Structure formats: structure tokens, C-alpha cells
Image: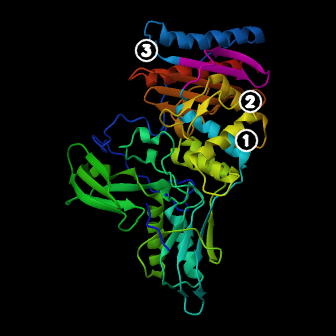
């Protein structure tokens, strides 16, 4: 961690991100253990693709839906191809207009939700913090001589858990500091991370300790770029490929080896290894990149998020002509006598939550969880993970999920962190939608089927396209889908479909089953018009 003294969200970042061609990469990274899907990157579920027509009669329509939902399960578990025979399957479907439970299948068994755990975090955050909550990052100085621009003491950077703080935000903060006349700091850059404690690994993240991918990035009160560095390899015709790091954190993240050939024939084959050293992170890049592929990038987690952010801010200050005399970065709380020079406020929680849920971002979810702990803690001191989970439990207890009836050990759902039943998940969705302080922002944050986020490639040519707002969840043996389906505002359904113990290689079958069930729900709703 930082020595004592005395963290690419294009939708939120201030500048656009240029898209790069995506080459076929034969080998990337060096994960030594089986890797769960880091987040629910665009999922494809085929479904039947057959247009369904439900009966017009209300009673017959309800029976029809139940039969079709059960048939979707039966076809995958006991049919000619029982691909999911060994899977645990829990389903609950509820009609929000009629207050009727339309279908259940083993709905009370606690199951691993994977990233559907983010629904619990989302509802608790909206209920507790409100959609307008913002995170503030601030810069302070000791005595400033406004005539000479000299700071006799230190300059402080205080983080308050902003999960979407970008390098551009820190660059603007540095520019604001310079605009206040600061030219020389005789002391050092000191970071204040006292909003959170120093336990940067969320619960269960230690289950895969050798994983260096960004989906397992650490959480601190001060982090930039979601506490991960982007390594980009760009083919250079006639010479070796160019390797760059973003953001620039000086000597904290270093390219130790860059041995990538630029080729005109054959496949792109790149290996990127991140090696944690006592005071920095080393990146080794080897292989070959086909010039026609343009460039390739991947993100690797850092181990000391506060130091990473401090180094980015230090570079930004240097670019503004602000010189810091002492190079060692310190860690301390901002003294009450320090002078506030500049502040950056994040986007509102409701906006940040869209980035979290649509792209299933673990870093944002865990940052929100710990922020909940910080904002509800009743005794002085930095927030702990226990504070965060207690805040979620307190919020959910008010809407019908009593503590001890379920398990949600972290905010993202990564690894073996949850045990929640489909009934409980639908209870959560029903309560959220009834509360106008929660429902609109929650629904807007969810991926839209066939349109965006992790559901962009599902139901594209189906009647369900644009009519499903749902959160996905994926781990090695887990597939989940929960949210809302509707053809108009007056008659939506809330549903939860959760599969555990999915056999290896059968996640596609699990998604296809869920898609068929959603197709049937939409046909049920269309027939009511």
C-alpha cells in the first residue's frame, strides 16, 4: 500500500473512446485457474425463434403460458436432448397488473444469482442514497502563497469512493488546481482514503487470487479507471508492434517486456502477463499481431488503487506545470486547516447505475456497496465490507426480505457470494417497481433485450425485442435472468429464471431455455390486447 507520512466508461468519461478492430486472439493473459465470466459481456441466447400466439381468453391464456414455460424446462431436462438434466432450475413469474403468480418451478430454493446480485445492490442503493447521490473527489493544500504560487506544505487528494473517476476527471482537477495559482508544492502529494478501510478485496474475490483481469479489480476510496490499466498493442507495418498503457501512472505500472511482432499473414497471437511487484506492476507483452487487425487491448487490475490514482494525478499536475518537491506519496486524512482548491462531482447514481447494470460492471457494484456502508455507518471510522452488506440487508428488510433468509456477501455476485431464491428476487422486483423513488431508475438501468448492454444480441428478431428489461448473470455453472417483460406500461410481468450446476458447455442451452420462456411471456401479454 501507499507509504505513510508524519481507478473505461465511454458513456460517463468526458471524452470519447475510439473503437478498435477486434482481432482473433489465440492466447491472452495468464490466469492459472478456471475463470468465471468476468461480467455478462453480450450474451447470445437463441430461443426457438418461432412466433407464438396465446389464446385470447384470459383463463386459457394463463394455462397456455404455464404449459409453455414448463415445456421449455422439460425440453432441456427430460426431452430428447436433456442438456440441463443435472442443473438446478428455479423460476418465478408474476403478473404485476393482476397481482397473480403465473408460474413457478422450485421457486424457494436459494441459488447463486451471479451478477443478478447487482439487483439487490441497486435497489438498496436507490432506496438508501437516492438516484441523485454523487461522489466528490477533492484537492486541498496547506498554506498557499497566492503571490508566488508556492505551497509551504503538502497537497492532498481525497477520494470518496467515486466508481467512475476517470483520468480526464483527474486531469481537470489538476487544471483547476493550477488555475488557482499553485506552481510549487514544497511537501508531497498525500492521499486521503479514510472514507473506506484498507480491505480492498471484496468478499469472495480471494477465491481466485491469481486472476489479474479487470473484472476482479480492488476497491478503495480513491481509484481511477476502475483500478485497472488498459494495455494496447498496435501493429506497426515494417517494425515491432507498439505497446502503450492507459492511464499513464508514471513508474507505478511499467512495461517490462514488449516483444510483439507485426505480421501480414497468419493469426494474431498475443500474451499479456501482469506481475505484481512490491511497489509497482510489471507488464510483459509477447506474441504477434496481424497488421490488418489494427490494435488489440485488454485491461489488467492493479494492486494498490490509491497509489495508481495518485500517480495519475501527479502526472496530471506535472502536465499543468505544478512541481511537487517530494516524490514519496503519503497517506493521511486531510487536516481541518487545509484549504479546498478544487472538487470533482461524479455523475448521479442513477446514471452510474446504468453503466453498472447494462454492462454488468463488478467494480461499480462493489464501490456502491462500500459507499452504502460509509453513508449508513453510525460510528466514526472508515467503512468496512460488513458495513456495506449490513446496509443492503437493512434496506431489503423493509421490502420483504428478512435478514438470514438469503445470502448476499458482496455487491457484484462474483464467485460463491449469493444464495437467493427466485421468489425472493421477484419480491424485490415487485417492491422496487411499486416505489417511484426506485422503480424508474432501476428499470432504466437494466439491459434492453435485442437493443443494448448484455442483452444486445438476444431476441433481435423476436417479438420480445425492446420489450424485456432484465439483468443477466453468468458464472462457470450459473446462468440467471431476472427483470421485467411488457408490451405496454399497464401490464408488465416480473420474472426470475436462475440455473445453477449448469453442465460444462451448456450455458448456451440454459440461455436458450430462458429466451424461450421470455418469448412465451411476451406472447401471453400480446394476447391480452
* Residue 121 in the image: above or below residue 66: below
* Residue 360 in the image: above or below residue 476: below
Stretch of the chain drawn in magenta: 89-111
**Residue pointed to by mark 2:** 400
Point 46% across, 58% down: residue: 305
Give the Cα separation between the discs numbered 2 and 1. Answer: 20 Å
Image side of residue 429 versus residue 482, left or right? right
Give the Cα separation between the discs numbered 3 and 2. Answer: 35 Å
| Quadrant in which the C terminus is drawn | top right
* Marks 3 and 1 close (CB-CB < 8 Å): no
Image side of residue 68 versus residue 378, left or right? left
Point out residue 504 in the picture as x, y percentages from the top left corner: 38, 23
**Residue pointed to by mark 1:** 440
Badge 1 crowding class, 10 Å Cα cut-off, few under 14, some 14 to 19, many 20 or more, is some
Circle on res. 83? 3
Point 58% across, 80% down: residue: 142
The answer to which image quadrant residue 28 occupies is top left
* Marks 2 and 1 close (CB-CB < 8 Å): no
Give the Cα separation between the discs numbered 3 and 1. Answer: 37 Å
Badge 2 crowding class, 10 Å Cα cut-off, few under 14, some 14 to 19, many 20 or more, is few
* Residue 114 in the image: above or below residue 104: below
Residue 108 part of the magenta segment: yes
Amino acid at each position: 500500500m501507499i507509504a505513510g507520512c508524519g481507478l473505461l466508461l465511454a458513456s460517463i468519461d468526458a471524452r470519447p473512446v475510439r473503437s478498435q478492430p477486434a482481432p482473433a486472439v489465440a492466447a491472452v493473459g495468464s490466469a492459472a485457474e478456471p475463470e468465471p465470466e468476468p461480467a455478462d459481456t453480450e450474451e447470445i441466447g437463441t430461443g426457438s425463434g418461432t412466433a407464438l400466439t396465446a389464446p385470447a381468453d384470459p383463463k386459457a391464456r394463463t394455462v397456455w403460458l404455464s404449459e409453455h414455460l414448463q415445456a421449455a424446462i422439460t425440453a432441456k431436462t427430460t426431452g430428447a436432448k436433456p442438456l440441463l438434466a443435472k442443473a438446478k432450475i428455479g423460476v418465478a413469474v408474476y403478473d404485476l397488473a393482476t397481482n397473480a403468480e403465473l408460474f413457478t418451478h422450485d421457486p424457494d430454493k436459494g441459488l447463486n444469482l451471479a451478477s443478478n446480485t447487482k439487483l439487490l445492490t441497486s435497489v438498496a442503493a436507490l432506496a438508501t442514497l437516492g438516484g441523485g447521490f454523487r461522489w466528490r473527489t477533492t484537492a486541498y493544500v496547506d498554506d498557499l502563497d497566492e503571490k508566488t504560487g508556492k505551497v509551504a506544505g503538502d497537497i492532498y487528494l481525497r477520494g470518496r469512493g467515486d466508481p467512475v473517476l476517470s483520468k480526464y476527471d483527474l486531469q481537470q482537477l489538476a487544471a483547476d488546481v493550477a488555475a488557482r495559482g499553485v506552481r510549487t508544492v514544497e511537501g508531497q502529494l498525500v492521499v486521503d482514503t479514510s472514507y473506506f478501510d484498507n480491505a480492498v478485496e471484496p468478499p469472495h474475490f480471494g477465491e481466485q487470487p491469481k486472476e489479474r483481469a479487470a473484472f476482479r479489480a480492488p476497491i478503495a476510496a480513491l481509484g481511477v479507471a476502475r483500478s485497472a490499466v488498459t494495455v494496447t498493442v498496435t501493429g506497426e507495418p515494417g517494425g515491432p508492434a507498439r505497446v502503450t498503457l492507459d492511464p499513464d501512472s508514471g513508474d507505478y505500472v511499467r512495461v517490462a517486456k514488449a516483444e510483439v511482432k507485426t505480421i501480414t499473414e497468419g493469426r494474431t497471437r498475443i500474451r499479456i502477463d501482469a506481475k505484481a511487484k512490491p511497489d509497482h506492476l510489471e507488464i510483459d507483452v509477447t506474441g504477434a499481431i496481424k497488421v490488418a487487425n489494427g490494435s488489440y487491448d485488454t485491461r489488467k487490475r492493479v494492486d494498490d488503487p490509491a497509489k495508481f490514482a495518485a500517480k495519475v494525478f501527479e502526472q496530471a499536475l506535472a502536465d499543468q506545470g505544478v512541481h511537487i518537491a517530494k516524490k514519496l506519496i503519503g497517506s493521511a486524512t486531510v487536516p481541518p486547516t487545509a484549504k479546498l482548491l478544487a472538487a470533482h462531482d461524479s455523475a448521479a447514481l442513477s446514471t452510474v447505475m446504468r453503466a453498472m447494470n447494462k454492462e454488468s460492471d463488478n467494480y461499480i457494484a462493489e464501490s456502491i456497496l462500500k459507499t452504502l456502508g460509509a453513508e449508513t455507518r453510525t460510528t466514526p471510522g472508515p467503512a468496512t465490507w460488513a458495513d456495506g452488506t449490513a446496509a443492503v440487508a437493512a434496506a431489503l428488510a423493509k421490502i420483504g426480505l428478512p435478514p438470514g433468509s438469503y445470502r448476499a456477501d458482496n455487491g457484484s455476485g462474483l464467485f460463491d457470494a449469493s444464495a437467493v431464491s427466485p421468489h425472493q428476487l421477484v419480491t424485490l422486483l415487485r417492491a422496487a417497481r411499486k416505489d417511484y423513488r426506485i422503480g424508474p431508475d432501476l428499470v432504466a438501468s437494466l439491459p434492453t433485450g435485442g437493443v443494448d448492454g448484455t442483452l444486445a444480441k438476444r431476441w433481435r428478431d423476436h417479438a420480445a425485442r425492446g420489450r424485456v428489461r432484465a439483468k443477466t448473470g453468468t458464472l462457470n455453472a450459473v446462468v440467471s435472468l431476472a427483470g421485467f417483460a411488457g408490451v405496454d406500461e399497464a401490464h408488465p410481468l416480473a420474472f426470475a429464471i436462475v440455473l445453477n450446476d449448469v453442465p460444462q458447455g451448456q450455458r448456451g442451452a440454459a440461455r436458450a431455455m430462458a429466451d424461450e420462456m421470455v418469448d412465451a411471456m411476451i406472447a401471453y401479454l400480446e394476447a391480452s390486447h
